[in-house]
Image (tube, rainbow, N blue to C red):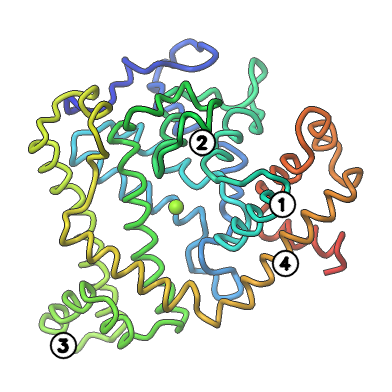
Amino acid sequence: MLAEYAVRVENSRGRRHPEPEHPYRTAFQRDRDRVIHARAFRRLEDKTQVFTRRYSDHFRNRLTHTIEVAQITRTVAAALGLNVDLAEALALVHDLGHPPFGHSGEKALDAAMRAHGLFFDHNLHALRIVEDFEQRYAAFRGLNLTFEVREGIIKHSRDYDAAQHPELAEYLLDQRPPLEAQLIDLTDEIGYNTADLDDGFEAHLLTLDQIRSGVPVFEHFFREVEQTYPDAPDKLKFNEALKGVFNRLAGDLITNTQARLKQDGIETLADVRLHKERLAAFSPEVEVQRKQIKDFLYENLYYSPSLAEEKDDAERIVTELFSFWMENPSALPHYYQEKAAQESLPRVVCDYIAGMTDHFIIEQYEKHCGG
Ligand code: MG
């Protein structure tokens, strides 16, 4: 069933530490399962996506967002004849490196690091988690994932400059990632763009009229729904219209990527890797619609005054705790104090904070900064 341009597990460049084959699972299936069984994966349950638990228990958190992205990714990857196991593993791991408190936490952590001439990047952090921090096996540190999964962690959403990142040299930075990895950035966006409209509406931070007038593709499907179900409650009309948007984005990603592969004469994985640009993409028309949704969410939800106070709290908590441990390294857990002997203190404090759940960091803040 695999297309010629898909990644084949039998051609994997393998693991850092060779392991015997598993009787029932391929190497990519095992990688997917290793991610699911990782502690960092379980912690996603208590990491903010956009809304904290203050709003409701049925909004997305980073774990349920991740599961939704994996679902979309499996569908798109299968339709394109790609390696679904690899794509699914990459979807499940894609947010593993996110710190607590969503974007605000990431921004504050990066700012704290920049004061020391360093920076925080969630893709690089995810690589550190799977290479080093997860400790499950007696024979090696980390999860010992295949090359293709590690490469996808680094390259799914952005390109890294080889001169700036000599430590990433093994990941073929001069080549495009396989399509299985290219997809993730787009399926991630399909996931959060539709989910954030949904949760924003449910939280009463976005009104139906606001979404209808601000998101043309939503309005298009809403009008159709009004014709078909004129008497349905607004919330169900909303759901049906959002489903239309969702299917348009995912369907277009499939058909447009297929068309581009054909048009550019892409036949093999080497063609994908050596192509001048990424091939997984929305069509120009749907790209405009995608951007309209994203701009709408930035203007009306992510920067909404209702979320401002929570974001300020998040930034203050991360910033103050970072300073606290910089000034009081002996208050760090023993494991991190040992690490500070080998690595710079800001990096160790950053690693510690980045791994925390929302709940745990608030507890630490109350303990050390008098909350
Ligand atoms: Mg994501």
Q: Is residue 10 left or right of residue 206?
A: left
Q: Residue at x 51, y 36 (%)?
A: 35
Q: Reply above or below: 192 against 136.
A: below
User: Distance from label 2 to label 3 (Cα)?
Assistant: 45 Å
Image location (x, y in percent) of residue 128 = 60, 34
**Residue 192, horizontal then vertical, whole percent:** 39, 61
Q: CA distance from mark 2 to mark 1?
A: 32 Å
Image quadrant where one finds the C terminus: bottom right
Dot in front, 2 or 4 = 4
Disc 4 element: helix
Screen quadrant of the N terminus: top left
Q: Earlier in the sequence, mark 2 or mark 1?
A: 2
| Residue 253 % position (x, y) | 21, 50
> According to the image, label 1 marks what residue?
115
Q: Earlier in the sequence, mark 2 or mark 3?
A: 2
**CA–CA distance between discs 4 and 1?**
15 Å
Q: Residues within 10 Å of mark 4 (few under 14, many from 20)?
A: some
The disc labelled 1 sits on which kind of residue? Ala
The numbered mark, 4 or 3, whose residue comes first in the sequence reads: 3
**Residue 158 sits in quarter:** top left
Q: Nearer the viewer, mark 4 or mark 3?
A: 4
Residue found 45% across the figure and 26% down from its top: 30
User: Which amino acid does the dot numbered 4 rest on?
Assistant: Arg
Precedes in sequence: disc 2 or disc 4: 2
- Residue under numbered circle 2: 35
Q: How many marks?
A: 4
Tag 2–tag 4 contact (CB < 8 Å): no
State the separation of the CA atoms marked 4 and 3.
Answer: 48 Å
- Give whichever of 331, 114 is nearer the camera: 114
- Identify residue for label 3: 230
